[in-house]
Amino acid sequence: MLDYSILIEHWDMYMQGFSNTLKASVLALIGSLAIGTVMAVFRIAPIRPLNWIGAAYVEFIRNIPLILIVFVFFVGLPAIGIRFDSFTAGTLGLTVYTAAFIAEVIRAGILAVPKGQMEAARSSGLTYLQAMWHVILPQAVKIVIPPMGNQFINLVKNSSVLGVIAGLDLMYFGDLISSETFVTFDVYIFVALFYLLLTIPLSLGVGALERRLAKSR
Amino acid sequence: MDFVGAYAPAHLKFLLEGFVVTLEVAFLSIFFSFLIGIIIGVLRYSRIPFLSPVLAVGVETIRNLPLLLIIFFTYFALPEVGFKLDKFYAAILALVIFESAMLSEIVRSGLNSIEKGQIEAARSSGLTYTQTLWHIVLPQALRRMVPPIVGQFISLLKDTSLAVVIALPELMNHAQIINGQNVNYVIPIFLLVAVMYFVVNYSLSLVSRRLEHKHT
C-alpha cells in the first residue's frame, strides 16, 4: 500500500515540480517550433547553403544525446563565461534538441503538400516566402498536428533531464522529497503518476487525431 | 579552451573505455528488448482475452513515462523492496523495460501491416494459427520492422547517456570526470563526445535509410 501521507505532506513541492515541468515543456515547444520551422524551410528552400545548414543542424542534433546538449548549456557555456540558471539551461537544451525533430516533422508536412500549389502561388506573383507562409504552411499544419503531438509527449518526458541539473522540475522535487523522507519507492510512484497525468491524455488525443485523419483520407 | 590538454592520450583512452560500456549496455538492452518486444507484440496482436488488454495498459504506461524515471526506479527504488541491482544491471533493466514497450509497438504495427488475406489463405490451406504466425506473418513483418528497429537502436544508444545519473561508467560519465579536472577541457571534450555519438548514430541511420529504400 502506498504511503499517501507523503503525497499530502509534500503536495506543494509536487505541484511546484509539476508546474515547472509543464512550463519547461511549453516554453521548449514554442522555441523548438520556431527553430524547427526555420530549419525545415532552410532544408527545402531553393538555396544550396541554406539546405546544408538545415541538414547539418537536423542530422547532428538528432544523433547526439539530449543530456549532452543540456550539459553544454549548463557546464560548457559557463566555461567560456556564458551563464544560465539551471531551469533556463535545461529548457534551452530541450529546445535545441526538440527543434531538430520538429524540423523533420514540418519538412515532411511541407513535402506532403502537392507541388502544384507552390507553382500556382509563385506564378500568381507571390514571392517564395509569401507562398510558403500563406499557401504551403497553412496546409502543412493539418498534416503535422498528430506527429507534432507525439513530439510534445516526448518533450514532456524528456523535460525530466532538468532533474539531472537541479532544474526544479518534477524529477528534481522527487529527488528532494525522497532525500527528506528517506522513502524512494512511493515518492517516485507519485512522480510517475504526475507524468502520466500529462502524457496519457496527450497520447489518447494524438491517437484519436490519427484515426480521424486516416479515415478522412 | 585547451584542446591539446583535453585530447591527451590518457583522456582519449578513458573516453573510449566509456564508449565501450555505452555500446555494451546498448547491445545487451536491444537484444533482450527485442525478444520481449516480439513476445508482447505477438500477444497483443493475437487479441487474447484478458492478457492482451493488460499488456496494452502496461505498454502504454511505460511508453508514457520518462526513461530517466525508470532508471531512478530500478536503481534507487527497487532496493527498498529488497531487489538490489548493480549499476550496470539496473541501467540495463531500465532500458529493457522501456525499450521492450517501444519495440512491442513496432512489432505490433509490423504485424498489422500484413494483409489479412494472407492469414485467411494460410489458415484455409490448413495451417494452424501459430503456424500461420510463425511461417507466414512474422517473417514478412520482421523485414518491414528492420528500419524502425534501427531507429529505435539509435535512440537507445543516445539514451544510455541518461545512466550518468547513477554514475554508470559510460561515455557521458567519463566525459564528466575529465571535465572535472580542468574547466578548459569542458568544451573540447563535449565536442569530441558529440562527434563520437554522431559518427556511430549517423552511420546507423544511413544503413536504416538504405534498408528502407530496398523494401519500398
Image (spheres, grey):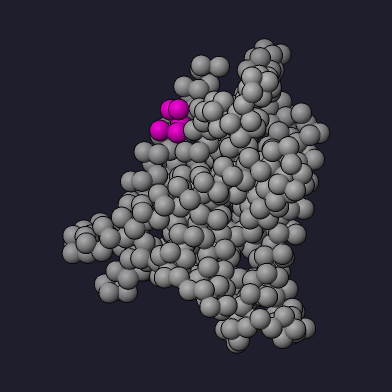
Left or right placement of residue B76 versus residue B46 in this view:
left
Q: Is residue B141 above or below residue A184?
A: above
Q: Residue at x 58, y 31 (%)?
A: A130
Q: Residue at x 41, y 52 (%)?
A: A27
Quarter of the image that includes the C terminus of chain B: top right
Q: Residue at x 56, y 42 (%)?
A: A37
Q: Is residue A206 magenta?
A: yes
Q: Is residue B90 above or below residue B115?
A: below
Q: Position of residue A64 (x, y in %)?
A: 64, 59
Left or right placement of residue A85 versus residue A79 in this view:
left
Q: Position of residue A46 (x, y in %)?
A: 73, 37
Q: Is residue B160 magenta?
A: no
Q: Position of residue B102 (x, y in %)?
A: 55, 44
Query: Magenta stretch?
Result: A205-209
Front residue of A95 and B129: A95
Residue B83 quadrant: bottom left
Q: Is residue B77 above or below residue A129?
A: below
Left or right placement of residue A125 versus residue A17 in this view:
right
Front residue of A178 and B7: B7
Residue A12 quadrant: bottom left
